[in-house]
Amino acid sequence: MRKPKEMFDREVEWAALEQFVSSEREGATLGVVSGRRRQGKTFLLDAVVRAAGGFYFGATEAADAESLRRFSDSLTRYVSPPSAYHFADWFEAVDAVLALGRERPVPVVIDEFPYLARANPELPSILQQAFGPLRPERTGSRTRLLLCGSAMSFMGRLLSGGAPLRGRAGLELLVPPLDYRMAAEFWGIGDPALAVRTHAIVGGTPAYPNEFLRGDTPQSLDDFDDWVVRTVLNPQTPLFREGRYLLAEEADVRDPALYLSVLSAVADGNATRSGIASYLERKAVDIAHPIQVLEDIGLLRRDADAFRRNRSAYRIAEPLIAFYAGVMRPVWDQLQRQGMAERVWAASRHRFASKILGPHFEELCREWVLYHADPDLFGGLPTTVGSGVVNDPAARTSHEVDVAVIAAADHGPPRLLAIGEAKWQDVMGRGHLERLERIRALIGAAGTFNTDETRLMCMSGNGFNEHLTALAASRDDVLLVGLADLYG
């Protein structure tokens, strides 16, 4: 199978699908493909079907009888049998799908499967029976059935726990947003400072630059503010309401206003459950369910504190949601009025830099350590990269650590390979390094980590002064990480 030349990246996903659908092994197999909307799942699966001569069916929101009739018509057009299919139920339809693979491996894609399952909740159980291990219709077939969906909460439950399809799938593929480096390449942005700013708003969703913005991308740092005004904050572009739609599309979200309020609380810097509850003036137990749902659908992420057990902090996992909740939602009424975007953005730039861009830069630094940096920089391969808070009893204060790089040890406490401070706007100097030295000493004294070889990382979006640069050149335990390193 040759990947289409117009498909950007997705090498890993294409290889996994190619291996799955082209396997000559006897017996029909089932796969599940999921991912949030706009990530290119349909484009990817349609390309696989075309390359392998398979069958593709895109479900829509419809009654069960109508969906079954549409499926019958689509399969009739694909097979061209002597007489048209008129399936009485989904049992017959699934057996017809299995029959496609009697002579060769045939990929079959059912896209937006949650639509079908909501109209007919028995459908997962029907598939469970159809893919029974000893059922002749399955063992005599090489159909490769792929169920695809964008409803993350539903797709996450499809193969979990006691779900009917638990143990039946041979592939579980998540199609994620593009990595921040790949996103910069996809948008055609070569300036790292511009790439960080853009990624902090739109993330790595492939559909945005071409389908939503018709190729309108920021051309330079000087163009960035104008680009924000004419695209993301422009009510005439589809991207303007995308932040609201991403949440509304999830079926498990019963009260969008409450969920948006939770996201706004996190975007405003309230990272703990008690902080979110206080922001909303509710009890912590009242927001437990919306927080859990937001985690399940991949919009909210809980990061464990690297230094304090049973402590965690929440952050918004989708940049566009964070931008909407932190910048757009507080002034939504003004933004909906044409011609107000420039005025709103002028008043919101500082909030964007402190509440959105700063935390986003910290997350990119952690991603760089985990996925891109040479492990030799830290003296070993990290097993965990996170953040946390270190108490300083003598000074009666605490210190936030933006990047904590940890590796397991064969004996004794885990090794703390590095700790880092990430500053987006600051030119970092000797004071930042001295603060890291103090934190390293506190962690070492606590005895929970081995700090014998802990490196100190200063990570800046605005560079380093000459004193810090000179110190770093003379010491093996100091690392300076700039934008060029993040995108190098």
Image (tube, helix red, strand yellow):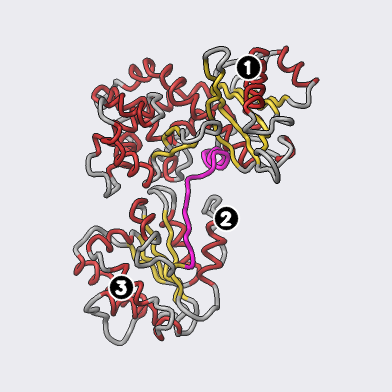
Residue 273 placement (x, y as % from top left)? 36, 32
In the rendered image, the vertical position of residue 130 relative to residue 289, given as above or below: below
Q: Give the residue at mark 3.
A: 126
Rendering coords of residue 57 (x, y %)? 34, 66
Work out whether 13 lies above or below 89: above
Residue 399: % across, % down: 55, 20
Could you say whether the residue bearing mark 3 is in a helix, strand or loop? helix
Give the percent coordinates (x, y) of residue 382: 65, 41
In the displayed structure image, the side of residue 221 where residue 35 appears, left or right: left
Identify residue type, mark 1.
Arg
The foreground one among 420 and 120 is 420
Q: Which mark is residue 405?
A: none
**Point 31% across, 41% down: residue:** 247
Tell me the kind of residue under disc 2.
Glu
Magenta stretch contains residue 264: no
Asked which quadrant contains residue 338, the reply is: top left
Tell me the residue that label 2 is attached to.
11
Which amino acid, by three-letter code, is at mark 3?
Ile
Q: Quadrant of residue 231?
A: top left
Look at 72% across and 12% down and name the residue there.
467
Specify which label sits upstream in the sequence, 1 or 3: 3
